[in-house]
Image (cartoon, rainbow, N blue to C red):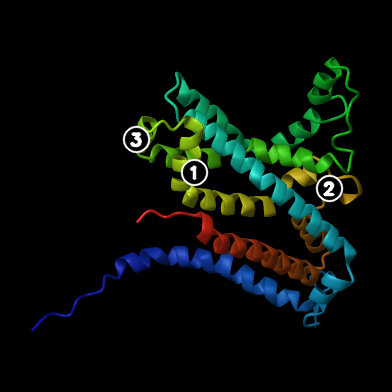
Amino acid sequence: MSKKRKIPIAPYLLLIPWFIGIGLFRVYPIISSFYYSLFDFQPILRTSRFVGLDNYRRLLFDFPHFWDSVEATLRYVLIGTPMVLVAAFFIAYILNFKLKGVNLFRTAYYVPSILGGNVAVALVWAQVFGGNGPVNAVLGVFGIDPIPWIQSETFAPFVLIFLSAWQFGSVMLIFLASLQNVSPSLYEAASIDGARKIRQLFSITLPIITPVVLFNTINVLLRHFQEFNAAFLVTRRGPNRATDFLNILIYEFAFVRLQFGFASAMTWLLLAVIGILTVILFVSSKKWVHYSD
């Protein structure tokens, strides 16, 4: 007669703090934000009035600035995400070669990703693209008049996109790790067949690392949707709110105007936008992502 297998209790006891943390700081805020989105909640007066889906209706049909913010956010995401991915892959591809001092360059390219969310870096970036900043100083050498980078509705979003593209270190390291896992024998066989480096890149390298491309794309996409510091500190929400991203709008209504219900509805609509784009990526990945058996 077989003995009953005893289930160890110690591992589950050790996981209790993790479950408490997830419950308090992840699950509860998500549930409460949806709850507040159905109310006209005033924290100062400590009053709440059930309004159902009225906050969502106001956002979608009676608040045009919401759509301006969605447009600004999507422009930043859809232009910035490919720029980060291309820059990260290009540098990773170069650093994958056996070059002298390559470890030093890997560290140098990774440092900006650590400092990127720093408030001090955002303020320095504002000075770099300021009216008398280094960028305009360099342009002046070639006889080009100063460009109002931060004061222009056209250029201000691209200042933030360039800052985002500068922070590709983490993405670059993930690409580099995937490139180093590609078997050298594949390149040797391709070289024997007469394939050049560019052909090897598109026929061997990219198809093999497409799962990593998908992973990095989703991570960078989520990071761009969560952008706050750069738009708030560098462009000060931009001329005519050209860089007034959804996160900043949520911050304004939640912590400045104290309209928690309205702000909570925005967060769920932002979640819906992120969810739609993520689903599109996963559905389309069936055609371009190749998993090894």
Q: Quadrant of residue 253?
A: bottom right
Give the amino acid at mark 2.
Answer: Arg
Disc 1 to disc 3, C-alpha distance: 17 Å
Residue at (49%, 43%) from the top-left corner? 206
Residue 84 in the figure: left or right of residue 262: left
Q: Could you tell me how far apart the alpha carbons at marks 2 and 3 are, in whole angstroms?
A: 53 Å
Q: Residue furthest top?
A: 141
- For marks 2 and 3, the one nearer the N-term is 3
Q: Which mark is residue 206?
A: 1
Left or right of residue 71: residue 77: left
Query: What's the amino acid at mark 1?
Result: Leu
Residue 28 pos. (x, y %): 60, 71
Q: Which residue is mark 3?
A: 189
- Residue to which mark 2 is pinned: 237
Q: Amino acid at mark 3?
A: Ala
Residue 123 quadrant: top right
Q: Looking at this rendering, what residue extends furthest in the front direction?
A: 193
